[in-house]
Image (cartoon, rainbow, N blue to C red):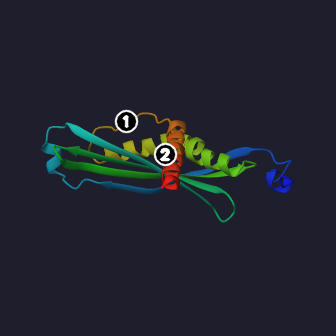
Amino acid sequence: MADKQSAAPQNEGEQKSIQLLKIYLKDVSFETPNSPAIFLKEWKPNLEFQVGNSAALTNDGQHEVILALTVTVTVNGETAYLAEVHQAGIFSITGHEPDEVQRLHNVFCNRFLYPYACAALSDLVTKGGFPQLLLSPINFDLMYKKRLEEAQAAKTATTKH
């Protein structure tokens, strides 16, 4: 017979909710290691883009979610600039199961933080003397599903050996 306590929600009357409490820049970095010489080269950039995220509980039980965007642009094999933004938000998330909370961190919160991070990156790049940086939208839901599938495949591969 299944244990009924473990299957019951934490608080049966608790409504599911998610609310943004604060949004802020956690960390910003901009480097132009080959300036001013890079400005004299023909501008045919090669862009490398990385996305990362993390989430943690604050001391008062809120959720701090950090979306990290890193852009490295090279011209003829030389780094023109390296820009990184860690856009953070504090969210109140209540009434959700742990799997749902993980999905909210990786999809909903990132989707909310992304436009702010893109704007901060574009501002850094423009102030650094380079052409405006316009990033394409990201399908965070697809990224999350892919990450889960890869984790499951890795788990399956290790259990077979």
What label does residue 150 carry, if any?
Answer: 2
Residue 67 visible (yes or no): no
Q: Is residue 158 above or below residue 138?
A: below
Residue 37 in percent (x, y) is at 14, 50
Residue 80 in percent (x, y) is at 23, 48
Q: Residue at x 29, y 41 (%)?
A: 47
Q: Along the polypeptide, which appears first: circle 2 or circle 1?
A: 1
Question: What element does badge 2 sit on?
Answer: helix
Q: Is residue 65 above or below residue 139?
A: below
Question: What element does badge 1 sit on?
Answer: loop
Three-letter amino acid code at disc 2?
Glu
* Numbered circles on residues, count: 2
Foreground residue among 7 and 77: 7
Q: Nearer the viewer, mark 2 or mark 1?
A: 2
Foreground residue among 77 and 9: 9
Residue 142 in percent (x, y) is at 51, 36
Q: CA distance from mark 2 to mark 1?
A: 29 Å
Q: Residue at x 16, y 43 (%)?
A: 76
What label does residue 146 carry, if any?
Answer: none
Residue 114 visible (yes or no): yes
Residue named by callout 1: 134
Asked if the residue under mark 1 is in contact with the one under mark 2, i.e. CB atoms within 8 Å, the reply is no
Residue 157 as seen in the image, left or right of residue 74: right
Q: Residue at x 72, y 49 (%)?
A: 97
Q: Residue at x 73, y 44 (%)?
A: 17
